């Protein structure tokens, strides 16, 4: 079973974090955890580690992915803080979709990181400007 991260201790939920990570090209799934009151706004985030290991990810790659997910959680926290505690999931999604340009730097950093770590594992990679160094530190060359 893929690992399940609890988001509630960080003051966010799986639905919001999933959307931010989706914009950063990181596929995760919101997931209910014990104590959730609604399956629509679950408190967990499922990360597909079996799929990653089947594509050749090793421990260091998982550390990089964890750092990117952590950054996605931080972006989610900041947006939630700006919207206030009464904001619904729809408000969050609408704000993020309308204001994505304001978050381009933060989300783009996650995109570059996710593309760099996943590039060697793509079945059909077409961007030769992405590299991962031998010690798996993210390196980006090219237009960004």
Image: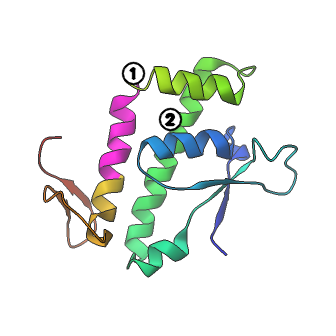
Q: Is residue 85 above or below residue 70?
A: above
Q: Quadrant of the C terminus?
A: top left
Mark 1 or 2, closer to the camera: 1
Residue that protrudes farthest toward the front in the picture: 124
The answer to whether residue 105 is magenta is: yes
State the colouring used for the structure image. rainbow
In the structure shown, which secondary structural element does the residue marked by tag 2 occupy? helix
- Of mark 1 and mark 2, the one earlier in the sequence is 2
| Numbered circle sitting on residue 102 | 1
Q: Is residue 52 above or below residue 66?
A: below
Q: Is residue 79 above or below residue 141?
A: above
Left or right of 41? Residue 35 is right
Residue at 26% in and 67% down: 124
Tell me the distance, in whole angstroms, between the alpha carbons under discs 1 and 2.
12 Å
Residue at 35% in and 46% down: 111
In the structure shown, which secondary structural element does the residue marked by tag 1 occupy? loop
Tag count: 2
Residue 103 location (% of width, % of height): 41, 27
Residue 133 location (% of width, % of height): 20, 67
Callout 2 crowding tier (Cα within 10 Å): few <14, some 14–19, many ≥20: some
Callout 1 crowding tier (Cα within 10 Å): few <14, some 14–19, many ≥20: few
Residue at 67% in and 27% down: 90
Residue 76 location (% of width, % of height): 56, 35
Main SS category, magenta section = helix
Left or right of 26? Residue 3 is right
Question: What is the magenta range?
Answer: 102-113
Left or right of 12? Residue 53 is left
From the viewer's side, name the closer residue of 93 and 110. Answer: 93
| Numbered circle sitting on residue 75 | 2
Residue 47 placement: quadrant: bottom right
């Amino acid at each position: 079973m893929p690992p399940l991260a609890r988001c509630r201790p960080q003051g966010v939920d799986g639905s919001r974090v999933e959307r931010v990570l989706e914009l950063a090209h990181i596929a995760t799934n919101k997931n209910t955890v014990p104590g959730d009151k609604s399956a629509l706004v679950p408190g967990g985030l499922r990360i597909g580690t079996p799929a990653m290991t089947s594509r050749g990810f090793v421990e260091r790659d998982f550390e990089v992915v964890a750092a990117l997910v952590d950054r996605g959680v931080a972006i989610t926290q900041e947006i939630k803080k700006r919207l206030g505690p009464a904001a619904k999931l729809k408000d969050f999604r609408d704000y993020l979709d309308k204001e994505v340009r304001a978050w381009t730097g933060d989300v783009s950093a996650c995109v570059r990181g996710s593309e760099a770590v996943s590039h060697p594992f793509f079945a059909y990679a077409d961007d030769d400007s992405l590299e991962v160094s031998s010690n798996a530190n993210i390196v980006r060359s090219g237009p960004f």
